Amino acid sequence: MQPQTFYRAVADDFSAVDEIIKKQLTSRVPLVSKIGDYITSAGGKRLRPLLVLLCGKALGHRGDDLRLLAATIEFLHTATLLHDDVVDMSGMRRGRSTANALWGNAPSVLVGDFLYSRSFEMMVELGSMPVMQILSRATRVIAEGEVLQLSRVRDASTTEDVYMDVIRGKTAMLFEASTHSAAALAQASDAQREALRMFGDHLGVAFQLVDDLLDYEGDAEALGKNVGDDLAEGKPTLPLIYTMREGTAEQAALVRQAIQKGGLEDLEQIRAAVEASGALKYTAALAQDYVKRAIECLEVLPASEYRDALVELSQFAVARTH
């Protein structure tokens, strides 16, 4: 990925966060360090720690604790990835084998637990009770979102409202926690804290909507994962829910059957049905709407290169192809 302006605005801090991550991965058990290093060096976008840095800087906060908070958020995110890949039985992430594919489920789950535990040690080091409150609640909500999604696998009766509950928990919550905790650490005003909390929520929803869109529009090489993974797992995402609700009887029946049985036998037919029903346009328009609302939340911040970078990051979230 090209180094967009929103990375350049905090380049030095971003490098420092990488160093903190490497240092905090150290363990007396070699396998812990090995798996931890493997997944954190996988070349992800690291948007969540980036949000911490940009929001904190936009509020005038310059302390080293902002970098530690950014690293803490990345540890929480990485722990969820390790656990998600085990739950989803995924074999590929970010263009290479998942940790569970290489080392097995048990080590992946346990190293995920290590990363969660380490993140809480880092939170304690920050010494901010408001940050601890935000992040500890976020971990609980994320877990609930994952369980809600699991409970709806192969359930073709899942509604758009339930889907939104799922993505608010499993994806948007950590975006929200990133922006909200940065505001809390910077001791921002109540209005700024609430606006940045909402900014993170709206951006996270938009990000997941685009992810679900790319499951039908993207190609595996660019995405670094298997296109159609969600369909194969029987997850009712918004393009599928919309097709069942607004498509023809034949389109709805095709999608309903695919969700109920899982697998990729009818992927091309499903793709055609999802596109013909208008589901992709609907999902894309909803993502654009959430990004517009996210950018409006940034009006509480003073003008700066960091606020500009947050706007650009928001626009990237819906324009990206991977």
Image (cartoon, rainbow, N blue to C red):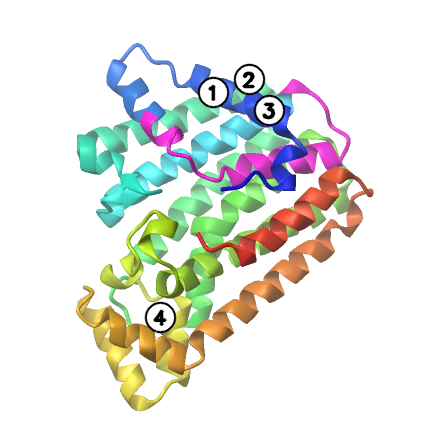
Residue of label 1: 121
Which amino acid lies under the numbered mark 4 shown in the image of this protein? Thr
| Residue at image coords 57%, 20% | 16
> In the orientation shown, which residue stands out farthest toward the right?
302
| Residue at image coords 31%, 37% | 82
Mark 4 touching mark 2, by CB under 8 A?
Answer: no
Q: Classify residue 184 by image quadrant.
A: top right
Residue of label 4: 158
Determine whether the residue tagged by mark 3 lies in a helix, strand or loop: helix
Decide which of tag 1 and tag 3 comes sooner along the chain: 3
> In the orientation shown, which residue stands out farthest toward the bottom?
249
User: How far separated are the C-alphas under marks 1 and 3?
Assistant: 15 Å
Which residue occupies the foreground of this view, 156 or 216? Answer: 216
Decide which of tag 4 and tag 2 comes sooner along the chain: 2
Mark 1 touching mark 2, by CB under 8 A?
Answer: yes
Picture disc at residue 125: 2
Nearer the camera: disc 3 or disc 2: 3
Determine whether the residue tagged by mark 2 lies in a helix, strand or loop: helix
Decide which of tag 3 and tag 4 comes sooner along the chain: 3
Which amino acid lies under the numbered mark 2 shown in the image of this protein? Glu
Would residue 130 be found to the left or right of residue 210 on screen?
right
Decide which of tag 3 and tag 2 comes sooner along the chain: 3
Determine whether the residue tagged by mark 4 lies in a helix, strand or loop: loop
Crowd around label 3: few <14 · some 14–19 · many ≥20 (10 Å): many
Picture disc at residue 67: 3
Which residue occupies the foreground of this view, 3 or 196? Answer: 3
x, y percent for residue 14 = 58, 27
User: How far separated are the C-alphas under marks 3 and 2?
Assistant: 12 Å
The range drawn in magenta is 38-64
